[in-house]
Image (cartoon, helix red, strand yellow):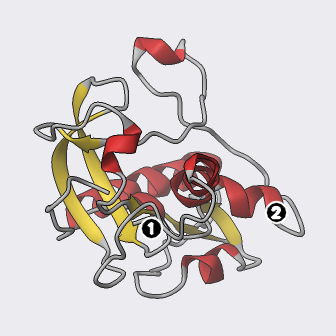
Amino acid sequence: MIANARMYSVSAPVEQAWRALLAHVADRAGVDLPYVEHPAPAPVNALWARPDCGCVFMCGYPYASAPVTPQLLAAPVPALARYGGRPVYFSEFIVRADAPVQALAQTFGARLACMLPESNSGYNAPRHHLMRLAPAGTRALYRPAAAPTPTRAKSSTRSSAGTPRWEWSTAMCWTCCAASNPGSRAS
């Protein structure tokens, strides 16, 4: 069995922390669980398709649609009071803290950073929500991205409720769902 934390290894120090945590879990469980490298651009769905996944982070869509449902070990419980101490699963549209945007419709015509198509909360759910908002005959709500560019940057953001916060962005820009702030660029 193997371990991997690619989904949340946003930097080398963070990956080392995940490796240490997974090694501790394996040690406490008394199982051999070597950490297997699977960095981008290797397709993450190839990692999830491995029959020897002992402890990996997986998006909700591949989890729910797997031919054999993986055993769920844990679900994140966000610390903010609005989640009531529950493992709430959600998608949230965010903008830079200094963006003049107050409503989602104000982002139309800009670019939207999305996760991989395998991600339910980071790609499929937002795409479904946005398709319902598009007027009939609209080809795209957002400008195409120059290229699918993975970003790993810590940026100041505001939630759709306007709450300022810092958040890690490990996003992929896609033509079908391409926003940050009009005029801003993914880096």
What residue is drawn where x is 60% and y is 65%? 137
Q: Residue 139 location in percent, x, y? A: 53, 70
Using residue 113 as the reference point, say whether residue 30 is left or right of it: right
Q: Residue 5 location in percent, x, y? A: 47, 62
Using residue 175 as the reference point, say whether residue 152 is left or right of it: left
Secondary element at image label 1:
helix
**Mark 1 is on which residue type?**
Arg
Circle 2 residue: 65
Residues under labels 1 and 2: Cα distance?
20 Å
What residue is drawn where x is 77% and y is 77%? 51
Within 10 Å of disc 1 (Cα), the crowding (few <14, some 14-19, many 20+) is some
Q: Is residue 133 above or below residue 58?
A: above
The mark that comes first in sequence, 1 or 2, is 1
* Towards the viewer: 142 or 124: 142
**Mark 2 is on which residue type?**
Ser
Using residue 68 as the reference point, say whether residue 3 is left or right of it: left
Within 10 Å of disc 2 (Cα), the crowding (few <14, some 14-19, many 20+) is few
Disc sitting over residue 6 in the figure: 1
Q: Quadrant of the N terminus?
A: bottom right
What residue is drawn where x is 16% and y is 48%? 155
